Image: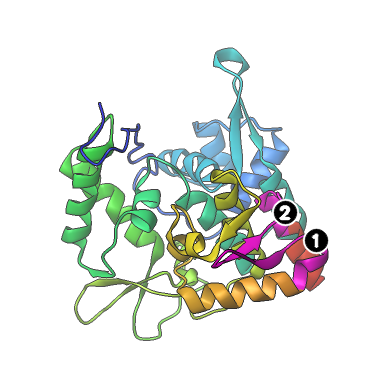
Amino acid sequence: MTPANGASRIRFEYSRHETFAIREGWIPKGLALLEERDGDFRPDLETADALGLGSKMVKSLGYWLEAVGMSETTGVRKERAIRLTPLAQMISMHDSYLEFPVSWWIMHIMLARREGSVWNWFFNDFNERVFDRTTCVEAFLKHVRDRALNPTSPTTAHRDVACLLSSYALVSGGEQPDPEDATTCPFRSLSLVVKHSDTGRFEKTRSLDLIPVEAFLACAGLVARDIGNDSITFVDLMRQRNAPARLLGLDGDAIDELATAAAALYRKHGVSISMLGTNRTLTIPRLEPSEWLSRHFARIGGAA
């Protein structure tokens, strides 16, 4: 069946997070266990004891490792195994405690690109800049009714939106996440969503901190790959699905600034800006996000 807008229906995932946002320290713990057990990550009591987490938290962590691009499943049935991705290996090598913002930016990109998820919907399809929780839930519910092969209930939609807002919404008033609060999701530090404490409403915002050039290139490069090109117009950097404007909360000036910086830093590696007719175009080498992460650490000359 095809919705009225012409887009084909897809299968959505719901509530695999078990209502838990990522917590401080979860991803490093999960990566260390995956390395120690050579990919044998099972959400059972033994794993819960090894990580010091509850059984539902372990199931949630298993989902998050997959959703942010740290793990992937290979094989089927008895041959089924979980392994670290190249991105996870690069993070383990350079930033094992996830102390550098670039790691969280790239994990955010991987999560927000996850097709058929509340994360992908929120950053691509939900166009309200200022909104309340009810509006967000109703919009997500309408979207999955229109687009999903497997629509869900209002209760489940509310649960998924609640997890998303808990993951990203930073309380206004200049309050920064408390590094000692293990229940705070590190994605809040990206400042992509703010919760206004006086009204209880939420607002999509632009990060006050400079987004690493390599995170921008990873995002733009994936979009260029999606459309089958090595180059992407500045218009598409704003408008395409999963484009930097959408996932990173960037306006035209910020994209221009980052693209110019990227071309200056990585011209020898094939990043350049040119004119294609009347359109400015960014050319990007076909590198995986893990490779851009590696280049970031090579550029700054540091590792955790």
| Quadrant position of the N terminus in the picture | top left
Image position of 250 (left or right of 50) = left
| Quadrant position of the C terminus in the picture | bottom right
Tag 1 secondary structure: helix
Q: Position of residue 27 (x, y in %)?
A: 58, 51
Q: Position of residue 102 (x, y in %)?
A: 63, 65
Residue occupying image coordinates x 57% and y 64%:
277
Q: Earlier in the sequence, mark 1 or mark 2?
A: 1
Q: Position of residue 267 (x, y in %)?
A: 78, 67
Which mark is drawn over residue 269?
A: 1
Given residues 56 and 227, the one toward you in this image is 227
| Mark 2 lies on residue | 285
Residue occupying image coordinates x 26% and y 79%:
197
Amino acid bearing label 2? Pro
Residue occupying image coordinates x 53% and y 48%:
68
Residue 95 occupies quadrant: bottom right
Amino acid bearing label 1? His
Given residues 7 and 94, the one toward you in this image is 7
Which mark is drawn over residue 17?
A: none
**Residue placed farthest to the front in the image?**
277
For residue 176, above or below residue 246: below
Tag 2 secondary structure: loop
Q: State the extent of the magenta-drawn residues as a range.
A: 265-293
Is 284 colored magenta in this rendering? yes
| Distance (Cα) linking label 1 and label 2 | 7 Å
**Residue placed farthest to the top in the image?**
78
Residue occupying image coordinates x 76% and y 65%:
297
**Residue placed farthest to the bottom in the image?**
173
